[in-house]
Image: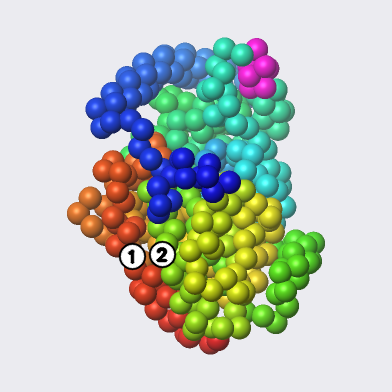
Amino acid sequence: MIDSFSRQFDEDGYRYIKSSSAQRQTQKIIKKSAQTVLRFLFTCVGLGIFIWEKLWRQLRPHKQSSQQKKILVIRVDFIGDVVMTLPAVYVLRQAFPDAQIDMLTTPAPAQLIQRHKDLSHVLICNPNSWLSKPFSAAVWKEINCLRKTLRAEKYDLALSVSGDWASILALISGAEKRYGYTQEAYPFFVTNSLPGGRYSVRQHESQYCLQLIHAAVPNAPEWLPSAAILTPEQDDIERLQLLLAQFGVAAADMLIALHLGSGNGTAKRWPIPYWAALADKLRAKYPSAAIALIGAEADAPLAERAIAKMQSKHGVFSLTGATSLTELIALSARCAILISADSGPSHIAAAAGALTLALHGPTDPEIYGPQGPNTRYIWNKIWCAPCYDPSDTAECRFGNPICMKGITPEAVEAAASAMLNAAHIF
């Protein structure tokens, strides 16, 4: 596994850049041109549907309703982004305790929120798979099935939270009212649009979602990040206890979790040797603590390489690929602290109320960082940071993400220790 890893990544865990700057620039131009053509075509479609809806509403009786009874939140995005939408879902639930509140999302985050207390149903679609085979009969059959499922619900309100794709799905849903941001929806695809987009001003991602909610539901309450919005289920807690016991971790033992990966671009990653040095420092300071390296199965090579570089491997073990996303909630709640680069697990841990230390370089933590009373971040803001473009993965255009390399193991250990001391965890 390490040999395969070495062919794809350098010593620090960053992906080898196979294309030149000119090639990447050409790819961006082609992508932008394709998006412009699509926007024109979809604008024409949207205008036709807009005119049809205007005529249809004049011909049918207007439905009177004192409140929204069926609401669809559309977030076809990454795990962390879906977690950052949950405060908006919480606010909706407070405003409409008896409403049917559904979320349409992609397969991975759907696993995480399948049993979320504020959601009635979780629906799944995968636009990325549609794009990979746009002329496939099976894809169009899947889209049509989704359209029938959504329209059968007769949603009163659809909230387009994640860009152009969400606006398409909002239109497909047939919801009476469809809210979204002007810059993140195809023209005429939403019935009510907010000016600008989620990144027009520098504020946290969750606030963009909340602004959309308050535009659609003016009487919705405010949200304060003071309580956990992800809570572990008892069966996940029990499975986690059995898993930890296999590595000799008892219920009373101190557990520290380190997440080394980042599925949305390697530039977000902290160098592998730094993780090894941090684990050594934490073991020296907290000799009775167990240290778990966590992540998806794809992160296993990172964990293997990091453990191989550690001076002391006692009490250190890898859980990469061994836990489900719901078990990760239980693991976060069980940990004394979770340390991670900008990735889904950092948001899950923060949402579970765990001590969470996030390491940022190419992404702005004031927009993308984990949020909550028990969170802290370290950001090495150099001249070229933040450079992350949400329309693409995070890869350093120079092939050398010194923003992440400038965060030292000593600084991370000091920050983690300060958080543990403040929380009286030793």
Q: Is residue 126 left or right of residue 402?
A: right
- Sequence-wise, which precedes: disc 1 or disc 2? 2
Q: Could you classify mark 1 by the number of other residues whose Cα lies within 10 Å: few (under 14), some (14-19), or many (20 or more)?
A: some
Where 155 sits versus 268, above or below?
above
Magenta segment boundaries in residue numbering: 137-143
Q: Are marks 1 and 2 in contact (CB under 8 Å)?
A: yes
Mark 2, residue position: 274
> Which label sits in the foreground, 1 or 2?
2
Please provide percent x and percent y for residue 388. 34, 45
Q: Residue at x 40, y 54 (%)?
A: 12
Give the residue displayed 68% in from the left and 43% down from the top: 122
- Residue 79 position within the rendered picture, expressed as x and y whole percent measured from the top left: 55, 48
Which residue does the image show at 60% across and 74% down from the upper left?
314
Q: Crowdedness of circle 2 by 10 Å Cα count: few (<14), some, many (20+)?
A: many
The image quadrant that residue 71 belongs to is top right
Helix, strand or loop at mark 2: helix
* Image location of residue 180, percent across then percent down: 45, 37
Q: CA distance from mark 1 to mark 2?
A: 9 Å
